[in-house]
Amino acid sequence: MSSKQPIAIVTDSTADIPDELLAEYEIHMVNNYVIIGGKSLEDRKDISREEFYTTLPNLKDFPTTATAPAGIYQALYERLLSQGKEFILSIHTSGRLSGILNAASIAANAFAERVKVIDSLSVSMGLGFQVLAAAEAAREGASVEAILGRLAELRKRIKLVAMLDTLEYIHRSGRVSWAKARLGEILRIKPFLEVLNGQVLSLGESRTYQKGFQRMVELLRRFSPFEKIAIMHTNAEDRARQLIEEVQDILPTQIFTVNVTTVIGSHVGPNGLGFTAILKSS
C-alpha cells in the first residue's frame, strides 16, 4: 500500500517526531545542525539530546544552529520523485523563526508544481502534529487539496506553551525581541512563552519553579479537553512525568513525551517544560 502512496511527506528535525512514527508513516526528515566550538554536529546523529543538554551550561561559547542547505532538500525531492512519487509536501518550522523554510523553498523551485513547501507557523510538536496529520491523510489516499485543508483546520487548534528555566538562553539567541529588551532583568525568573502564528510571544513569568509548575497545570486544565497532546521538556524528564501525573485525569490515552531537539534547545536551554496540544473541536 505504501509503495502506491503518491504523495511524499518531508519535514526537518525540529519536528521532534519519534523515530518509530517516522518509519511507520514513511516521513522523510532532514536533519539540521548545532555548532559547538566551531564543530558542526548533525541533529539526531552526531550528538544525543541528553549529552547536549548536560554539556550546554558548561560551554564557553554559546552554540549556534544551522539549517541543512537547499542542496540537501533538492537531492531528497529529486530522489522521491524519481522513485515514483507524484507530489511532495514539505512541512517545516515557522519561517519567522528559522531559515529552514527558505532553504526548502529554494530547493522546491527546481521542481515546478510538484513540490509544495508549507509553513507550519509552529515548532517542535506543533510542527510534528501537522506532519503526522499530513502523513496519515496521504496514507488514506487524500488529495493534496484535502491535506492542505486538514492542516489549515488543525493549525487553528494547536496550543504550544513552554516554561523556560531561565531567560538566559533565549536572550542570548537574539531570536526574540521581547527577550532582548529585558537585559537588565534577573535571569533566574521562569519565563513563559507561547508560539502563535509563527511567533514566540511572552506570557509573563513566574519567580519560582513551583509557582511556574502550578501555572502550567492551570493552563492545561483551562485548555482541555485535548484531541492529542505532547509533554515537552529539555532534558527534564522527571518534571515532565510529574506534570503528566498532576493532570492525568484530563489527558487523552496517548501522550507523547518529547525531549526537545538540540536545535531548539540551543535557544531555550535545559530544564524547560511545556506542552503542545491539539484542542478538541468545539
Image: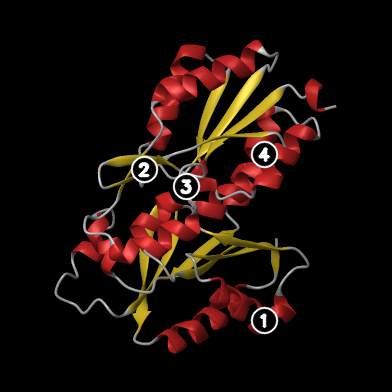
Mark 4 neighbour density, 10 Å: few (under 14) some (14–19) many (20 or more): many
Helix, strand or loop at disc 3? loop
Please name the residue that numbered disc 3 is placed on. Answer: 121
Type of amino acid under label 2: Ser
Q: Nearer the viewer, residue 218 or 148?
A: 218
Which sits earlier in the primary sequence, circle 2 or circle 3? Answer: 2
State whether residue 69 is above or below residue 164. above
Type of amino acid under label 3: Leu
Q: Nearer the viewer, residue 144 or 19?
A: 19
Helix, strand or loop at disc 4? helix
Q: Closer to the camera: disc 2 or disc 3?
A: 2
Please name the residue that numbered disc 4 is placed on. Answer: 134
Are the residues at dot 2 and dot 3 in contact (C-beta closer than 8 Å)?
A: no
* Residue 240 screen position, x and y as percent: 57, 73
Which sits earlier in the primary sequence, circle 1 or circle 3? Answer: 3
Q: Residue at x 66, y 27 (%)?
A: 8
Distance, label 4 to label 1, CA atoms, is: 30 Å
Type of amino acid under label 1: Glu
